[in-house]
Amino acid sequence: MSRPPLHPVAAVVCGMVSIGLLFGLQGAAASDPTLPPPPAVGSAGWWLVVAVVVVQAVLVAWTDRFPTTVPPALTAVPLVLAVAAPGGAFTVTAVAEIAGVFLAVAARPPRGLWTALAGTALLLAGGQLLNEVRSGAAGLGPAAAAGVLQAIAVVGLPLLVGLVVAAQRNAHDARVKEVEALRREQDALLQAAVSQQRVGMSRELHDIAAHHMSGIALMAAAIDRQIDADPEGAKRSARQIREQSSAVLDDLRRLVGLLREGADATRPLETLDAVSVLVETRRAAGAEIDLTVPAAAVDLGALAQLVAYRMVQESLANAAAHAPGARCTVEIGEPHGGQVAIIVRNGAPTAPDPGPGSGFGLVGMAERAQLVGGELDHGATPDGGWEVRLTLPLSETISTMRAPAPLPEAPA
């Protein structure tokens, strides 16, 4: 922690002003015989006044470092004059006292200075009283009144000015801290937004990889079985692998495009209508999937439809990965009670489960459901399979369901 600075300039100014006033008193006393005469220039009393003024100037320089001790010391030193050389020159010592009180108040909060300021005022009033009585300028009563007035003027006025300066400084510091706090808050919000975007991007990447890669794995396995027994079927599976690979690249390009400033988001969001295409794609890859859709329109907003689509996509990918050979059922229920349920269920696997996954798929589905006010439930079924149920609140109608349609074959 850095030490408070010294005030050499203030010390020099106080010394020069005090000595200048001392010379001014000589001329004033010469022109007005009613004023108490100051010590003659060069006399012992004059040099004593100069010594006191110099000591006060040195003390003023240390006010910031010792704000509770310097002001009382500034008023204690002139007591030497009140005892050894009382007279009109005593008033020049007020210059350093005023400067010391102001610097002390401006250096630190005044609540820690009240004792020091009270002691300063008492010493100043006592010194003025002693000087007036010993110089014979006034009686005890008038001298006491003069001491009180001197204390109020010398301590009170710089105290008020110092409080104003300290208040302005504190207000400036508060504004600086407020700006820093706002900057830190903006940085925190930016980091939170970046983190949220990263979570969203990782969720999309997980969905893309899980869906397409599981489909490619199924079709590759079909090629292995068909290459000798059914060469034409193997060719079709190879074309489907190419289509799936192209779809992966398209989705990855779209995801990377979202990271670029000003990316062209021309691709529409997936809706419930696309679920039938999704199911047909999985069927073409060799999966056994039953699809049930409602007869009437399902009133879901665009974001809710995307959540439903991603849930079906992820659930089918999980079924392909962890329940190989199991038959799946995708059911989009009839709207009821202001809600609609989307259920993906698979039976028991006919091949060994390769082991547990990362668990991020279910977490991502649950987070998406919360974004649109929905709920996600999942768990094992009595027949050894697995079920995922997504319940979404209804909103405005976006589109109507259409029956599944077979995908056209790509040219060889």
Image: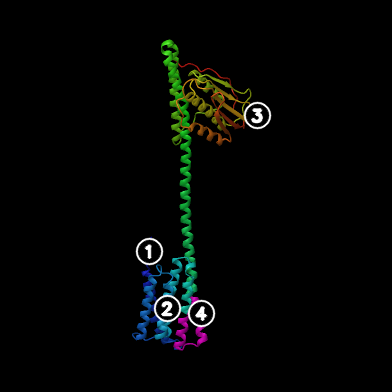
Which residue is found at the position 48% from the left and 56% from the top? Answer: 175
Q: Which residue is mark 3?
A: 336
Residue that badge 4 annotates: 148
> Can you see residue 397?
no
Q: Quadrant of the N terminus?
A: bottom left
Whichever of callouts 3 and 1 sits on the residue coming sooner in the sequence is: 1
The picture places residue 331, in percent across and down from the top left corner, at 58, 24
Upstream in sequence: badge 4 or badge 2: 2
Report the amino acid beneath label 4: Val
Give the extent of the magenta segment.
Answer: 125-153
Q: Residue type at mark 1: give it.
A: Arg
Q: Tell which tag, 4 or 3, sits nearer the viewer.
A: 3
Q: Tag 2's secondary structure?
A: helix
Q: Are marks 4 and 3 in contact (CB under 8 Å)?
A: no
For marks 3 and 1, give the CA distance.
74 Å
Q: Decide whether the magenta segment is chiefly helix, strand or loop.
A: helix
Amino acid type at image mark 2:
Ala
Secondary structure of the residue carrying numbered label 3 = loop
The image position of residue 71, as x and y in percent, is 43, 73
* SS assignment at label 4: helix
Front residue of 172 and 311: 311
Numbered circle sitting on residue 76: 2
* Label 4 – label 1 distance at C-alpha: 35 Å
Q: CA distance from mark 2 to mark 3?
A: 91 Å
Is residue 148 located in the magenta-colored stretch of the structure? yes
Image depth: mark 4 or mark 2 in front:
2
User: Counting other residues with Cα less than 10 Å from the Cα at mark 3, is it few (<14), some (14-19), or many (20 or more)?
Assistant: few
Which residue in the structure is indicated by mark 1? Answer: 3
Q: Position of residue 201 (x, y in %)?
A: 46, 34
Query: Is residue 351 positioned above or below 266 on the image?
Result: above
Are the residues tagged 4 and 1 within 8 Å (C-beta)? Answer: no
> Which of the two residues, 236 or 158, is positioned nearer the viewer here?
236
